[in-house]
Amino acid sequence: MNGVVRAAGGIITRQKPDGTLEVAIVHRPHYDDWTFPKGKLQAGEREEHTAIREVEEETGMRVRLERALGSTKYRDHRGRQKVVHYWVMRVLDGHFRPMPEVDDLRWVSLRNAANMLTYNHDRALLRGLSNEVDAGALQGGERKGRTSLRNQMSSTIYLVRHAKALARSEWAEPDDLRPLTKAGKRQADELVQRLSAFSFARVLTSPHVRCRETIEPLAKARKLAVETADPLAENSDADDVLAFIKTLGVRPAVLCSHGDVIADLMTNLVNDGLATESELRWEKGSTWVLESDGDTFLYGRYVAPP
């Protein structure tokens, strides 16, 4: 990636009461263009955190990631190759205030956005979103012409390995009761911030205490119940775990499990065609962000442990 400008941004969406999907586009007076909010990565920053930071700075709205949408590649105004990764986002709160860099923001339908956007690469990205939304509406049985974000919000699983626990040799009681160490509890607390950029609707865990303790602070911070799922227990078969994941329905979810389960599942997914941005690993307290098209897992990103 030497010489390539890396950036990240977001397509903020909202749905009107009549089902019409709108996206936010911004005007930059310096370039006199209409585009999606985005910006360059800072040193050591991950793309998803750049996307959150830049979108919030340019729009004044606090947002959360729904799912990865894709990337665009083009030459910037200085002739440099630029790669921008985008996420679909939703607004938590806040409102737009004009500033020197961005002086206007419009909520527009997908059709109007296509007409207003200045750049072909932005229109191509919008077409990708439109195609996914149309497919989701058809699969969801929605009335023709009415868009839906249900499937776009359903395609991400956050697979967490439990944090550091007492060694088996130091624990005389049943292994499923083995708790986290002090370091593990710190990891669990820090996981709240580590996953703060991501949106999810459910938190599920292996019945083992060390998994539940790992995920409880995150669930509490999001005001979500912790659901116990036996298929996530240690020594579970990877095929059974995958079958269970496919029963979860349309909403993104956090799943906390064990090293052996995650190792087998990730190995199987890669063998079935999952693309990853790094070598397979599953340190205690780490997370795999798994993106799917609703049926097949397509891409995995590793989030290192706190």
Image (cartoon, rainbow, N blue to C red):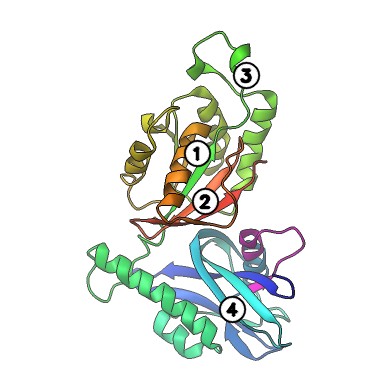
Dot 1, crowdedness within 10 Å: few (<14), some or many (≥20)? some
- Which mark, by number, is residue 289? 2
Question: Where residue 213 appears, x then y in whole percent?
Answer: 55, 28
Where residue 160 sits in the image (x, y, percent)? 53, 40
Name the front one of labels 1 and 3: 1
Secondary structure type for disc 4: strand
Indicate the quadrant containing the C terminus: top left, top right, bottom left or bottom right.
top right
Quarter of the image holding residue 57?
bottom right
Residue 260 position within the rendered picture, expressed as x and y whole percent measured from the top left: 49, 32
**First in residue order: circle 1 vs circle 3:** 3
Distance between the Cα atoms at labels 3 and 4?
Answer: 48 Å
Q: Residue at x 77, y 62 (%)?
A: 43
Does the magenta run of residues contain 238? Answer: no
> How many C-alpha atoms fall within 10 Å of the one at disc 3: few (<14), some, or many (≥20)?
few
Residue bearing mark 3:
167
Q: Earlier in the sequence, mark 3 or mark 2?
A: 3
Q: Is residue 220 above or below residue 47?
A: above
Alpha-carbon distance for marks 1 and 4?
Answer: 33 Å
Q: Secondary structure at mark 1?
A: helix
Highlighted magenta segment, given as a residue range: 38-51
How many residues crowd around disc 2 within 10 Å: few (fewer than 14), some, or many (20 or more)? some
Residue drawn at the location 71% of the way across and 59% of the way down: 45
Per the image, the residue denoted by label 4 is: 73
Outermost right residue? 43
